[in-house]
Structure formats: structure tokens, C-alpha cells
Amino acid sequence: MTSPHTILLVEDDGALRTLTARALRQSGFHVLTAATGAEMWITLRESTIDLIVMDIMLPGTSGLDLFRRLRRESDVPIIFASARSSEEDRVLGLELGADDYISKPFSTRELAARVSAVLRRGASSPEYGEIGSDGRPPDLIHFDGWQVSLARRELRTATGAIVDLTGAEFDLLITFLGYPQRVLGRERLMELSRSRIGDSSDRSIDVLVSRLRRKLQAGGCDAPIVTVRGVGYMFKADVKRG
Amino acid sequence: MARRTIGLIRRLGLPERLLAVLVLVLIVDFAISSYLFERENSFELRLDDAERIAENLVMATRTLERAPVVERNHVAATLSTVRFRYYLTPPDGSERRSLGLEGLRAQVLAFEPELAAGGLELHLERLSSHHNIAGSIRLADRSILRFQTHANTAWTLTIGRVVSLVLPTLLLIAVGWVLLRATLKPLRDLIAATRHLGAGPPQPVPERGPDELRSLIRALNEMQQRIYASLADRTQTMLAIGHDLKTPLSRMRLRLDDDSVDPEIREGLSHDIEEMLQLLNSIQAYVESDGRSIQEERIDIAVMAETLVDTVADHGGDAVYVGLGNLEVRARPVSIRRALSNLIENAIHYGGNARVNVRRVDGAAEITVEDDGPGIPEARIADALQPFVRLDTARARDTAGMGLGLAIVRKAVKAENGSLTLCNRPGGGLKATIRLALPSQ
């Protein structure tokens, strides 16, 4: 077993900080804590941090300002925690470059799952491909006139209209986009899709693929997913990033 | 009858009432002045007529009484003029009585008292006749002298005279009406502004019109500000409470994950925490559902509805989608998604199933969510849309939430200038319809 990842928890509420730290330790992480932005900077200088879990409603400097500065100076993956659980906060956080968002209150299991998923993604992200100019993988992916935003988890048509996907459908699409023009078996697709976020769907891959296909047929075009008999599926469109 | 009149008066608007007062004043004024004028005028004119009739009659009776009896008819014809005609009739012995025109008769007798001896009688002729006054007088030999004459017409009211008197009055009324309406326009603006009060940020009504109206408008504008401030305050308070409660809830949830907690207690408390969270989230959703801070976007409403149906069906709900494959509208995705989701969840919860349709109807997108449940009593449909109203009071604890579900839908749809209607389907069950304008191509 490799040495445990070090998580920096930035949270102003003392009791909650203690409880969250305990929850993360129980899940096998090494945890450092900070109550303010200033403490956070000191800890960041002194230790090697693998991931930051941060409450955006910190007193003093607003959490978002702190977050912007942190993003400029460091590539450490960040998970936003917020009690507001509003869609705007979530989108704003993700657009500013947070790697994930978790709304309070969360359970130990949920927090551990998110942290693990983000760490796993950071360690090996074959589907993200090249790194953008800001040192981070590009957010936008284009294919056949469609546009996918990874941060907003959004699919848009050529006219800019948002096309809703369920979490599982989005994960499946991202998996396809990571392996264009390659035949993927059902089990492999399932494994790759599920590893992304841990949101399990009872639906079989076949059902998910057929729903995704139907949604990608807008405007009368053929969906870019073809069935390879007896093996699985293949995404045939060209995929452009950035 | 009286009640109907009162009802009619009550229905009259302010300008109509003021106009009615004006008309009434003018009518009274007209009636009084024309009565006085006519009295004065007709008295003078009657005096002229009386004098003429008296002179003519005296001369005719004297001339005829001096003439031989055989020539009297001839003399009467000679005395006749166009305006004063005489003819004789034999004595009939009847009582001489004047019919009407008593005033005129008195005046005539005042000029020539000797006519009283002959029993002067005067009456009005039929209207068709050329002459309008006729009468008779007894001569000394008891034969009757009849006469017809034409009195001055001015002392009867004619249509022409009425029009000439009424026209200025009508003109006055018309001018009064226009001025009244102009004066009351600021009041009408105020009424229109009051209708939209509280529906959004305050929109000050310009202060115009008379002083009383200005102060009314100022008071209303101040009230708008107060209402807006207090609503904003309430919203902030609700959000703050929701936010602040989440920190202790977070602690509780993490405390429950401690191994020393009895699993049964953990499950029960987790359930309670979950329910509290749902309440807080529904308040937050309600406060945010007007979507003021969220941008409008192009969204595929058909795919959105279908995705929500799929999600419900995946979790075991009886939901089907039967609408179009694609239909783009402009709306705030988060609030519209929540609205559709609430309708579908309501259908599943209260009706047992959900049938969702998205159609294009008359240039609008129509989204319907139907169920086969018991529906809502007609009288309570309006209540169902009100925030914090729950229809199922008898089994209130059966459902989570604060009765905000449909209120959130209504607010979200209103923010898109769309419409939400609820109705019971003829075959049973509830049907909720959302209409949204389609973007111009």
C-alpha cells in the first residue's frame, strides 16, 4: 500500500472541522486542518498537499477570492464544500477550476468517495489527453458540432441549446470522448464510466447507450455511436479539445 | 327597483359619478333658468295678445250690435282679417265657460271690462288649425259671436328653442368629461401600478395630477419600497437560517458516522436529518425559483422532460414520456428543470404515475404532466398553487416538504413569462400544463 494522501481541510467551524478531519482519517487519509485562509497558506508552504477540501463561506477573505488566488498559485486539486447547495455556487466553483463540489451536510462515505474520485482522476486521466495552456486539462470538448463542458457537466447543440443528460449518461459520453474511434466492450465501458464518479445506475450499458444515441440525434443527424456486433460500441466522430 | 338603481350607481366609475354630478347641476340650472325666463317672457307676450284680442273684440261687438240683424253676418265677414276671423251663430243657451287660458282671459277683461257682460269664453284650438286660440262672446240679442285668432307663438316652448338652450349645456358636459378624464388619468396609472405591486422590484409611479393624488402616489411609492425591502429581508432571513442550520446538520451527520452509535438510532436520525434537509432545500428552491440571478439559456425542453422521466423510471417510478424528441426554448435551465421535476414528483406521489408530453402548440411549447390519481377538488386548485399550503392535511406527515412544490413551479414558470394551469382530467386524475413561448427563429 502506498503512503496515504495528505488532505488539507479548510473549515472555519471548529467542531465541524474536527468531525470532518476524523471522517477523512477513518477513510485512510492523512489530514491537516486550517481554520482561516492565512493558516491555509502557511500549511501549504510547509507541507506537500495532495488535495484541499475547502468551505467557500470562510470568514475574512471570501472563500471565492481565496480560491481564485489558490488556483493561480497551485495545481492542487480542490473540492469545494458549501452549505448553500445552490446551482450557481456549484457552477461558479467548477468554472473557477474546482475539481468537484460537495454540498453540506455530507456523510463520511460521500466525502471519502468524492476525495478518492478526484485523487484517482488527478493521478491517471487518460481521457483528458493533453494539458491546456494554464496547466490544466481543457474544459471544452467538441465533436460533430456538439460541445461538452466538463466543469459544468453540460452538453450543448450547435445552436448552443443545453441538452440534459443524466449523470450516468454524461459519464458514458465522457468515456466515449476519451476513446474516439476505438471499440469498447460493454464491461469496459461500465467500468470506465462508473469509476468517474461512483454514481451507480441500475441501467444496463445498452439502455444508456440507446438513450445517449437518441439525444445525439437532434437535428436529424445520425448519432456518432455505432454498435459493433458482438463486441460493444464505438464513438466514430472526431473529438477536438479546447 | 331601488336596489337595482343603487347597484347601477355603485358600478359607476369616479369620472362617471363626477360627470353625473355635473349633469345634474346643469339640468337643475337649466330648468330653473328656463322656467324663470319663460315666465317673464310669456307674461309680456301674453299681455300683448290680451290687449290685441280685447281691442278687436270690443270693436267687433260694438259694430255688430249697431248693425241691422240681417246684415250682421256680412259685417262679421267684413271685420274678419287673416289673423282675426269672426262668424255668428244663433243663441244656444249653454253656459259660457272658459276652458283653460284663464290667465289670458283675465288679462283681456282687465283691458276691456265690458266684455265680461258678454260671458267671454276662450279656448285653445286643435293644433292642426291655422289659428291657435278661439273663443266666443254673447251679443246683446243673445246671438253668439265666435272668433278665431292667432296668438304669438313665442310663449310656447319649441324644439328649436330647447336645442338652442341645451346645446351650450351639452358642449359644457363634453368639455367637462374630457377635463375630468385628463385630471383622473394619474389615478388610473396609479391603479394599474398597484396591480403589479409586489410582483417584482418597485416601479415608482410618476407623481402627477392634483395635490391629493400626488400625496397618494408618493405614499404608494414609499409603500412599494417598504414591501420590497421587507420581502428581500424575509428572503435573506430564510436563506440565512437555511445556511446556518446546515452547519449543525453537517456535524450531526458526521457524528452519526461514529462506530459507537447504535445502528438503529443512526438510521432513525439519518432519516430525520434528511427530512430537515429537504425542508431547507425546498425553501431555498422557492426563494431562488424566480431565477433573477440566473442567465436565460437555450435549452432542449423535450430532452429535459424525457431525462427527468427516465430518472424517475430508473428509480422505480411509473413515468412515461410521450412527447417530441426535441424542442428548444429559452429559459433558466435550473429553475425550469426543478419545476418539471416537481410536477413529475407530485404526479407520482399523489397520482401514482406520471405521463409527460411536450408539444408545439400555436407557436408555444406546451408541457403537460398527467396522472391517473384522484385529482384536486376544483375549489382547492387555486390554493394548491399558494406557497406553504398543503392540501393533504389529513395525512400531512406522509409527505416531506413545506407545501412549496407547486409554488416553486409557478414562480419558475412566471419568471419565463410562461403560464401554469392545473385542471382535473375528465377521465380522472390531474393535468398540469406549462406553456412557454418559443424563441423567434
Image (tube, coloured by chain):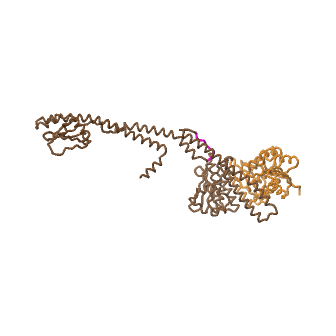
Quadrant assignment for the C terminus of chain B: top right
Q: Which residues are magenta?
A: B199-206
Q: Position of residue B213 (x, y in %)?
A: 54, 41
Overall secondary structure of the magenta section: loop
Residue ID at (69%, 63%): B316
Apparent colour of chain B: brown
Q: Position of residue B307 (x, y in %)?
A: 68, 56
Which image quadrant is residue A28 in? bottom right
Q: Position of residue A148 (x, y in %)?
A: 74, 49
Magenta stretch holds residue B418: no
Q: Nearer the viewer, residue B387 or B307?
A: B387
Q: Nearer the viewer, residue A90 or B265?
A: B265
Q: Is residue B292 visible?
A: yes
Q: Nearer the viewer, residue B373 or B66?
A: B66
Which image quadrant is residue B319 in? bottom right
Which chain does the orange colour mark?
A
Q: Nearer the viewer, residue B222 or B153?
A: B222
**Eyeballing the image, is B113 above or below A209?**
above
Left or right of B441? Residue A172 is right
Which image quadrant is residue B399 in? bottom right
Q: Position of residue A89 (x, y in %)?
A: 73, 49
